[in-house]
């Protein structure tokens, strides 16, 4: 039945309403679902459940409140908090009035938050209790007006306000998502509505598209492009989204219960979480309805993939590869390819044009190493407030990813290294990834990373930073060197070793080598 609730479109003329309905963005998809299936669940989480109809009403009310506070088209509004239904509602409300949402990493320290809020020029923010605590210690960010999730947000969302309609074009920026800043200060990738629409097409090509009556679960943080890239397509496909509480990351039993209770069919996790879920006692006997499971952010071992296949035999397994600037997916690997092309990130998906080039911009022959470059409708609008960085990344009309890859005879791509992670020792280029894989295979090593550190003779030499499998019996440098002697060339061997309790990783599970360099690299 049609939704009789007054909406912002009611104030427009029939011709204006028709023109507004042609826009291809998730606000319009929300309105369509609210009209066609107002009582079906759109979002559910620990902080509540919203149908398509109630979600549209709450988004409009929050949007109207933002307008009353003076927020206008193009203004930036940050969000700092853990995943919640309120978080997703806030992003939609910000976009609904033509403003730009800036999700911030809840793991950031106050000084980092100050930089991000100042750099984005945010005029207002949303935060949960944890986020508000961080903001209280951030001198610059604490000066920005704040709306807190909970009673304050619920009162606004339930006020019955109707925002004044803003005709938001698909080419306008929807979000500024900051990159991890592995070599410099974080850069804000400006992602448009058309960027996310292309991500929807990419996601649907990777596996069966979610439909009404099905459910997907978002576990990855919504401040990360992987979380946003999983949430957005649900609004195009009309799929119910379960926003998992953060506790599930530590309690696999809770995650399994939630999958079963909410009839979740689609789920993305990083490999370490898939390992933990598959290792849960009795997991194979449970009635978990997963039919499409995916992984990314870090490599998955053959053992992990086999565990996934054995545990969820009715599910299609796929992997996604990409980066924030591409909204994010660029390559995908699915089904049996995960085993037959182990280590590959797959093939480019249809919405992305790809080349592999040398430093001069020329195409490299198949099988040789080069940088993978992209273009297509998923490519960002640019870096916020950094036109020089945007120009640098796209000097020749292609976005330069910084990833060094090789392509096999079947057209599958393999990441060899990040260009900035190449170690040059005695004039030889050393792939840190190759050395890491060799070191990580040692039975005494649970996790490993390799970085280049200054050396008086070779200029630079590999340093292995390892997490021991048994803290009481860590490996020695000599043991590691002996173990990898027949696995990699002698000049690639680590000449230094550091043993740590854990390696620094971001919210998506990616290793943060800049943190290791800051700790272990000493010039001189």
Image: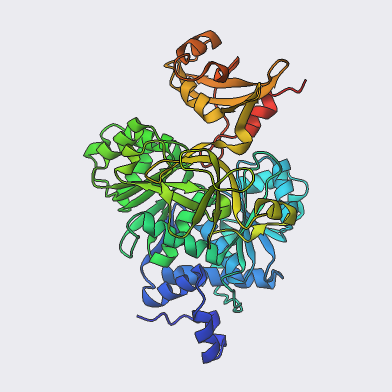
Residue drawn at point x = 53 percent, y = 56 percent? 327
Could you tell me if residue 120 is visible in this image?
yes
* Horizontal side, residue 217 vs residue 313: left or right: right
| Residue closer to the observer: 183 or 308 | 183
Q: Is residue 362 above or below residue 211?
A: above
| Residue closer to the observer: 197 or 346 | 346
Q: Is residue 497 above or below residue 150?
A: above
| Residue closer to the observer: 509 or 57 | 509
Residue drawn at point x = 54 percent, y = 74 percent? 160
Q: How is the image coloured?
A: rainbow
Image position, residue 378 (x, y; %): 53, 60
Image position, residue 494 (x, y; %): 57, 17
Image position, residue 385 (x, y; %): 73, 57
Quarter of the figure with the C terminus:
top right
Image position, residue 484 (x, y; %): 47, 16
Choose top left, top right, bottom left or bottom right for residue 68.
bottom right
Quarter of the figure with the N terminus:
bottom left
């Amino acid at each position: 039945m049609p939704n009789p609730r007054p909406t912002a479109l009611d104030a427009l003329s029939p011709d204006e309403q028709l023109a507004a309905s042609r826009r291809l963005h998730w606000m319009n998809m929300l309105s369509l679902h609210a009209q066609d299936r107002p009582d079906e669940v759109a979002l559910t989480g620990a902080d509540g459940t919203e149908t398509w109809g109630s979600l549209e009403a709450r988004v409009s009310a929050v949007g109207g409140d933002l307008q009353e506070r003076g927020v206008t088209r193009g203004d930036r509004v940050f969000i700092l908090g853990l995943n919640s239904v309120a978080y997703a509602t806030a992003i939609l409300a910000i976009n609904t009035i033509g403003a730009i949402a800036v999700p911030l990493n809840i793991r950031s320290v106050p000084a980092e938050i100050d930089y991000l809020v100042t750099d984005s020029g945010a005029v207002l923010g949303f935060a949960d209790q944890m986020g508000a605590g961080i903001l209280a210690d951030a001198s610059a960010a604490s000066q920005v007006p704040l709306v807190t999730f909970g009673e304050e947000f619920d009162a606004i969302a339930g006020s019955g306000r109707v925002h004044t309609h803003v005709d938001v074009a698909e080419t306008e920026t929807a979000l500024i998502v900051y990159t991890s800043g592995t070599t410099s200060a974080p850069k804000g990738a400006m992602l448009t509505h058309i960027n996310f629409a292309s991500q929807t097409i990419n996601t649907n090509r990777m596996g069966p598209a979610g439909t009404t009556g099905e459910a997907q679960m978002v576990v990855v943080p919504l401040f990360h492009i992987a979380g946003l890239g999983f949430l957005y397509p649900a609004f195009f496909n009309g799929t119910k989204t379960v926003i998992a509480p953060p506790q599930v990351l530590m309690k696999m039993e809770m995650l399994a219960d939630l999958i079963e209770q909410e009839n979740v069919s689609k789920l993305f996790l990083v490999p370490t979480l898939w390992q933990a879920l598959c290792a849960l006692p009795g997991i194979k006997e449970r009635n978990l309805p997963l039919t499409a499971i995916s992984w990314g952010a870090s490599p998955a071992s053959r053992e992990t993939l086999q565990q996934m296949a054995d545990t969820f035999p009715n599910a299609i397994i796929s992997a996604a590869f990409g980066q924030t600037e591409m909204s994010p997916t660029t390559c995908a690997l699915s089904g049996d390819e995960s085993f037959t092309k182990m280590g590959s990130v797959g093939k480019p998906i249809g919405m992305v044009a790809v080349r592999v080039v040398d430093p001069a911009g020329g195409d490299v022959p198949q099988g040789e190493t080069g940088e993978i470059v992209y273009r297509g409708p998923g490519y960002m609008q640019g870096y916020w407030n950094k036109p020089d960085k945007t120009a640098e990344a796209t000097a020749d009309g292609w976005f330069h990813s910084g990833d060094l890859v090789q392509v096999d005879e079947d057209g599958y791509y393999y990441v060899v290294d990040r260009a900035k992670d190449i170690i040059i020792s005695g004039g030889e280029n050393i792939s840190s990834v190759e050395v890491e894989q060799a070191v990580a295979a040692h039975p005494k090593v649970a996790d490993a990373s390799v970085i280049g550190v200054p050396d008086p003779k070779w200029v630079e030499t590999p340093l292995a930073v390892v997490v021991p499998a048994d803290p009481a019996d860590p490996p020695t440098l000599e043991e590691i060197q002996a173990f990898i002697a027949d696995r990699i060339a002698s000049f690639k061997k680590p000449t230094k070793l550091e043993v740590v309790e854990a390696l620094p990783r971001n919210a998506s599970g990616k290793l943060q080598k800049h943190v290791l360099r800051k700790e272990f690299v000493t010039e001189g």
